[in-house]
Amino acid sequence: MSIMTQDGILNISLMGGQARAILIESTQLVQEAKRVHGLSKIATAALGRTLTATAMMGSMLKGADESVTATIKGGGPIGTVLAVANEKCEVKGYVGNPGIDLPRTSKKLPVGAAVGKEGRLTVIKDMHLREPYVGQVNLVSGEIAEDFAMYFTASEQTPSLVSLGVLVSDEKVESAGGLIVQLMPGASEAAIRSIEMSAGMFTDISGTMKEYHLEGAVNQLLLHLEPEVLERRDTRYACDCSRRRVERALITLGRDELEDMIATQHGAQVDCHFCNKRYEFSEGELRALLEAATSREDK
Ligand SMILES: [Zn+2]
């Protein structure tokens, strides 16, 4: 018998539609983030949890080319933690200090101490409206799951349980996963109580994923809430950067910046924050971009 270990996201109806769950197995995508950025164990846990939550939020988007960006700035030594997901559940991200190491005070990795809690979680959803949707909450603990739960509850007015877990050994990501349970409007008191009572079962999500994987975790975690799987989506770590996008970004910098790059560096190297791909521009190529920027500014 082979066990399906591919990453994926399930959209699950609970108790006849009184609540819903999004369940993700994200082991491979967190492993890929670790590989791309050379993340320490703490950085793997912090970015992995954030990527896992953001991928689930990507699965809630509806339209083509929509995206959601989650930024955590907690004032801690890891710096900024940022993740972006699109409606295809492709996710990418980075942390300010990928090599961070802190002494452990318990069995758990000190993610909250690395992130800090004197700051905010900001969520920006670009749904091609005139203005993007921006929601912001003060951090609860910097442990990330609680912070996303606060975001859903306070900013989106949807009471939510959020569990995120990354189990990382010295070599690799052993397992990673997440669960969001949200009450739907009109949920009965009994339904609310059932969910409150089951919250304790959701705490070891990475352990559950390691043992049961995505499909098996549904019954393991949610059986008593009458789960009905509505949809399964693939999810992965992917960067959509391109030379064209970098060129556009350089043009947006404007005439003065480009002239300065030509005069002082005689070229430019631009590294993608998400995949570390390097784009090189010669002096001649920068001059062509300068022309494009100049004609744009003259308009
Ligand atoms: Zn890239």
Image: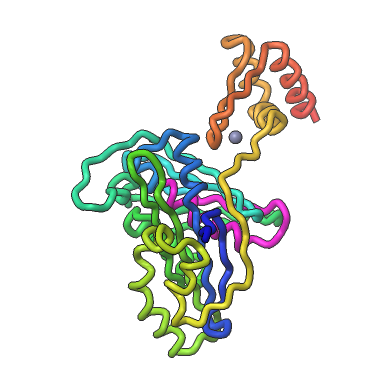
- Report the residue that reaches farthest toward the front: 1
Residue 17 in the image: above or below residue 27 = below
How is the model colour-coded? rainbow
Residue 105: x and y, percent? 19, 49
Question: Which residues make up the magenta segment?
Answer: 47-70
Q: Quadrant of residue 55?
A: bottom right
Quadrant location of the C terminus in the rendered image: top right
What residue is at 35 percent from the left and 63 percent from the top?
204
Relative placement, left or right, of 256 versus 106 is right
Residue visible at 72% across and 30% down in the picture:
244
- Residue 71 makes an appearance in the image: yes
Q: Residue at x 29, y 49 (%)?
A: 109
Residue shown at the point (62%, 64%) measured from the top left: 232
Percent across and percent down for residue 155 are 49, 65
Q: Is residue 176 left or right of residue 255?
A: left
Ligand 1 lies in quarter: top right
- What x and y, as percent, mark residue 186? 54, 86
| Displayed quadrant of residue 264 | top right
* Relative image position of residue 47 (x, y in whole percent): 43, 46
Camera sees residue 126? no
Name the outermost residue toward the left.
105
From the viewer's perspective, tell me whether residue 209 is left or right of residue 187.
left
Against 154, residue 272 (above or below) is above
User: In the rendered view, would you say 297 is above or below 170?
Assistant: above
Looking at the picture, tell me which residue is in the foreground, 266 or 212. Answer: 212
Check the image and report above or below for 238 versus 193.
above
Instruction: Count every numbered label the image shows and give the total.
Output: 0
Is residue 73 in the magenta section?
A: no
